[in-house]
Amino acid sequence: MTAAPAGASTTGVSAGAFDPDRPHRLSSSVSVRPESFGALVYDFHTRRLSFLKTKPLVHVVQALEHHDDVHGALAEAGVTESDRDQYMRALAGLAQAGTITPR
Amino acid sequence: MKLVEHFTHGLTSPICLTWELTYACNLSCVHCLSSSGRRDPNELSTDEAKAVIDELQRMQVFYVNIGGGEPTVRSDFWELLDYAIAHDVGVKFSTNGVKLDKARAEQLAKTDYVDVQISLDGATAEVNDHVRGPGSFDTAIRAMENLHEAGFGQFKISVVVTRQNVDQLDDFKAIADRYGAQLRITRLRPSGRGADTWDELHPTQAQQKQLYDWLVARGEDVLTGDSFFHLSAYGQELPGLNLCGAGRVVCLIDPVGDVYACPFAIHDQFLAGNVRSEGGFQGVWQDSELFAELRGPQSGGACTKCSHYDACQGGCMAAKFFTGLPLDGPDPECVLGNGEAELAKLQMAGALEPGVIPKPSLDHSHKTTRGPRKNGGPVPLTLSVRRPDKACDSDPLAGEGRRLPAAVRVS
């Protein structure tokens, strides 16, 4: 099993290419399966399995396509200011892995 | 709760589902987990297999590991492969390469969401064919050449580590590099026919350390199916999931639709149900009593007192079961030697006599004897020339006492 941790443990990932001011969405090759801890994410293209470790993160990822920027999705999912950095890092990691993509 | 604890309690669907499509196989590997050889007349039909795929799609099982037997000898294999992919179920299939000619390799290279895993248990024909049978090395290499030439990309070479091939790990890596493949090495299990060859094939204690050091040095470069977590007790945890996933994140669907806790545990004790039952596969996965038990608190027995228990989690359930060790005891390959000590104790107490150690519930082995485990060539068959002692013998040769050839070439 190829497992890429995604969520709170994506520290160290460069957020260089990830621009939260732009609109994003889940990549078309990605499927999300809800689980008690959050969700499993599978990319049929890269065959990479990863984990969204919290339910709000699942909410954010699924809300992305309805917002003009990432901030809107974070607000919809009720992510608090204190958790914001952590979520941004997680999303940057997901962007780098190709799980989410600008639209 | 940590992620790994969620895994312990089970998920809504498996992460890693192995589906053995047939017990039929052209080979008779001496360590075959499923004692494969002959097709079972009760195997799932094409329509039944498609119904399982529909269900996997609904359950969002993103991909299945298809094996056997040799799955490609099923005449509907390519049809089922296309059906799965069209229904959002990616396929990784294991094969000995027998059907992967140039045309099939090109077909596969054009197919998205399919991954191919070629089994190879020796980096030389000598070591490989000793386990997998005469000619099997050449068959595997030819399949690799075909995939490489067709531009398939990164297929996988799957190696079961044995006492005989553990010194060839770098050679396997070189073969993988030569064909642009990724190396996957997994643990030998005393399951199926592997129970009969375990003592001869399983790595020694010294070799286990050698393997561990090699894995640590290689990191995520080499896939392991997370099968060596019992070695984590040497120190640093190996990459991947360090726990027994049986019934929690892993299970097996066998060719007749029976659902077992893991691919290494084809035994009534680990049988959770059948996909033909009313609730289908989902019903078995979500409601079986066996799986509920495996997802509940586990007793680690004496192992819980060991300072390495967090690392190895008591090891592999199937390896314990089929060597005669208690499930809450140490793994037979416990790196501290507790498994060997326990086995020696049981041996002394006469608890490992034949008939006491659990045997696999099913055996589809070929009824004929495989060719010699050395060079191939003619299969020496000793045919009786003595006069039959039963009056009812109606064979035209019966009683003739005719001299028959001592060796018959079997093509």
Image (tube, grey):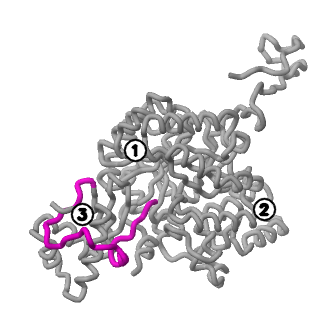
Label 3 vs label 1, nearer the camera: 3
**Subunit of label 2:** B
**Along the line of sight, which residue is nearer the eye, B86 or B384?**
B86
* In this view, B325 is above or below B153: below
Q: In which quarter of the image is the C terminus of chain B?
A: top right
Q: Quadrant of the N terminus of chain B?
A: bottom left
Which residue is depicted at the point 31% across and 50% down? B57
Task: Name the magenta segment's main secondary structure.
Answer: loop
The x, y position of residue B188, in whole percent, is 65, 56
Residue that label 2 marks: B352
Which residue is depicted at the point 61% across and 41% down? B36
- How dense is the environment of label 3, judged by Cα within 10 Å: few (below 14), some, or many (20 and up)? many
Mark 2 / mark 1, whichever is N-terminal: 1
Q: Is residue B304 magenta?
A: no
The stretch in magenta equals A1-29
**Along the line of sight, which residue is nearer the eye, B82 or B153?**
B153
Q: Is residue A24 magenta?
A: yes
In 3D space, how far apart are the residues under numbered discs 2 and 3 (Cα atoms)? 55 Å
Circles 2 and 1 on the same subunit: yes
Which residue is depicted at the point 70% across and 72% down? B335
Q: Do the residues labelled 2 and 1 touch (CB within 8 Å)?
A: no
Q: In this view, does B287 lie to the left or right of A20?
A: right
Indicate the secondary structure of the residue bearing disc 2. loop
Amino acid of disc 1:
Val
Amino acid of disc 2:
Leu
Circles 3 and 1 on the same subunit: no
**Subunit of label 3:** A
Indicate the secondary structure of the residue bearing disc 1. strand
Indicate the secondary structure of the residue bearing disc 3. strand
Residue that label 1 marks: B114
Residue that label 3 marks: A100
Label 2 vs label 1, nearer the camera: 1
